[in-house]
């Protein structure tokens, strides 16, 4: 009887070792997937995918004006015919230049996730970035810029 207990105990020990050794590749796989997932989130965060909502760097041109909820797109063609073209430049360091009037010198600005701030006056203007367009809001008017 004592020999049976020893044999049973030895079998259980061997079975436990087999189960543990069979789980090692599974555990290593799970750890590897977790490491890759964490690395991916870090890389995407550094690249700005999960970080800042500031629009991508580039030159933007006026594509629409909205006043009292109605598009004034016909005005844009008229403005361009007279050589007036409002513009927006965004740099990768969240700075840029904005020329709302389309004439004279562009004003230096900085961007946050929701505001454009004038470097000279400190005045802030709300904006949104959606569907590749920057919409600047001031009172009851909006100017919509799209990357050239």
Image (cartoon, rainbow, N blue to C red):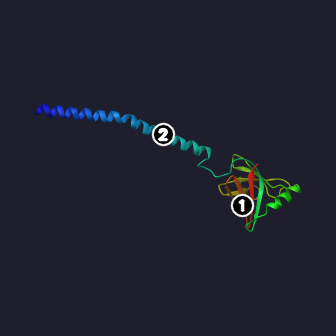
103 up-or-down from 57: above or below: below
Mark 2 / mark 1, whichever is N-terminal = 2
The residues tagged by marks 2 and 1 sit, at their Cα atoms, a distance apart of: 41 Å
**Which residue occupies the extreme right position in the image?**
82
| Residue sitting nearer the eye, 22 or 31 | 22
Bin the neighbour count of mark 1 within 10 Å (Cα to Cα): few under 14, some 14-19, many 20 and up.
Answer: some
Indicate the secondary structure of the residue bearing disc 1.
Answer: strand
| Residue 21 figure quarter | top left
Indicate the secondary structure of the residue bearing disc 2.
Answer: helix
User: Which of the numbered marks, if any, corresponds to residue 125?
Assistant: 1
User: Which of the numbered marks, if any, corresponds to residue 35?
Assistant: 2
Residue sitting at x 34%, y 34%? 22
Bin the neighbour count of mark 2 within 10 Å (Cα to Cα): few under 14, some 14-19, many 20 and up.
Answer: few
Relative placement, left or right, of 18 versus 51 is left
Relative placement, left or right, of 79 versus 112 is right
68 up-or-down from 15: above or below: below
Label 2 or label 1, whichever lies nearer to me, is 2
118 up-or-down from 36: above or below: below
Relative placement, left or right, of 141 versus 32 is right
Residue sitting at x 39%, y 37%? 26
**Which residue occupies the extreme left position in the image?**
1
**Residue 49 on image: x %, y %:** 60, 47
| Residue 117 figure quarter | bottom right
**Residue 119 on image: x %, y %:** 74, 55
């Amino acid at each position: 009887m004592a020999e049976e207990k020893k044999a049973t105990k030895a079998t259980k020990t061997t079975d436990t070792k087999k189960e543990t050794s069979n789980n090692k590749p599974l555990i290593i796989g799970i750890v590897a997937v977790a490491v890759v997932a964490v690395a991916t989130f870090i890389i995407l965060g550094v690249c700005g995918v999960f970080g800042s909502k500031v629009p991508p760097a580039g030159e933007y041109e006026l594509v629409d004006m909205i006043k009292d909820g109605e598009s004034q797109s016909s005005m844009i063609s008229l403005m361009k015919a007279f050589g007036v073209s409002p513009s927006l430049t965004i740099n990768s360091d969240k700075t840029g230049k904005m020329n709302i009037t389309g004439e004279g010198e562009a004003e230096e600005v900085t961007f946050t996730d929701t505001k454009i701030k004038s470097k000279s006056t400190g005045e802030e203007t709300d904006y949104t970035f959606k569907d590749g367009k920057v919409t600047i809001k001031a009172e009851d008017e909006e100017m919509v810029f799209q990357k050239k």
